[in-house]
Image (cartoon, rainbow, N blue to C red):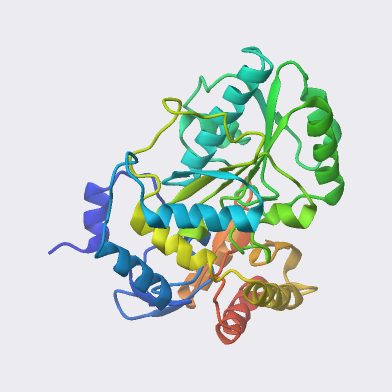
Amino acid sequence: MKDIKELDHQYITGTYNRFPVTITWGSNDIAYDENGKKYIDLESGYGTNSFGFCDSDWINAVEEQLHKVQHTSNLYYTEPCVKLAELLARRTGMTNMFFTNSGGEANECALKAARRYQHLHKGPDCYEIISMKNSFHGRSYGALSATGNPHYHEGFEPLVPGFKYAEFNDSESVESLVDANRTAAIIVECVQGEGGVNVMTQEFADALTKLCREKDILLICDEVQAGNGRTGTLYSYEQLGLRPDIVTTAKGIGGGLPIGICMFNEKTKNALVPGTHGTTFGGNPVACAGALSIVERLNDGFLDSVKRKSAIVFEAFRDAPGVAAVEGLGLMIAITPASKKASDIVNECLENGVLCITAGPAGEKVRLLPPLTVTEEHLKQALKVLLRAFAE
């Protein structure tokens, strides 16, 4: 039989530059390849395996639901979907949820809802949406058009019309693009993930709040990567005092199964009505059962442990040899090398049993997105490997 890598190259569309590793199984923060080599996982599937590999509570929740109902259409009620929506409403203050299969789909829902809301309230000319340069919101056409990075647009023009791109953390740049009669919404990540783990300033957050309130512009917070405990709070916008009209999330809330959610507040909850949007798989009872087991455990004590482990990472890289900067929030962290290429550091870490990835417009930073359940022991072991790779 051919090697799995050969079969991949033969049968899988070549859209990924994979590492030369086949992950065969894992336990919490440890992954193993086909040769039995052990890796400390500091990327968790781009932040998706928030409770690591094969979390027992998550498996039990998923397995229990699999023995009941694995799928129905959205013509019927299912308990896991409703329970998850109720819990999120209670924890966030948002009022209504639309379930999808991914973060990109959640953002598509948000963009459609924002335009339809303003169409009803301001008229058909109010459809423009402002996003930030170096943002990432997904790869389907609406989400791609909202993504403020020309690299992802190349070869796919013309994009969906009506999107403008402002400088992140620059309120004057945003204000220069606003037309109260045409600007429907501003979509923003409080921590830009793909863009380099750039953290929103309090000044910028306050300016967005004021601008949206004064001009009646909807504020959409994309919490696909930064949400679900990743930054030390349930959602990162909480730390900035933002009160978004729409919130999108995915990745870590599913614990490894595909799920996305678009959350609406009281103002926007009726923007979508029967016939305006839909999904076949969104709200899948198995995915929702798994997500429910994740959110139920994101309590204050658990979030404190995320902050504690975050402090360990920041302290390790502060003034470390070969490190130009360390930035981020919680366990969403990027380290800029002083001279080496970030990709070289990532490859060295891979060889030495640590999984991490790059970030930034040119992949110039090393990004860490460990499982929130990473043990302090394994975290410190991995940091030794990383620090050595930066210093050499």
The residue most toward the left is 1
Name the spot of residue 267 as percent of width and height, x first. 67, 34
- The quarter of the picture where the C terminus appears is bottom right
- Which residue occupies the extreme bottom position in the image? 377
Return the residue nearer the eye: 154 or 137.
Answer: 137
Q: Position of residue 52 (x, y in %)?
A: 47, 72
Can I make out residue 372 in this image? yes
Residue 362, percent from left and from top: 61, 47
Q: Nearer the viewer, residue 18 or 107?
A: 107
Q: Quadrant of the N terminus?
A: bottom left
Q: Image quarter for residue 378? A: bottom right
- Give the left or right position of residue 206, taking residue 120 as reference: right
Q: Which residue is at 64% across, 67% downward?
A: 331
Q: Nearer the viewer, residue 324 or 360?
A: 360
57 vs 125: above or below? below
Query: Where residue 101 sits in the image (x, y, percent)?
Result: 41, 46
Name the residue at 59% across, 32% down. 146
**Residue drawn at 81 percent across, 33 percent down:** 213
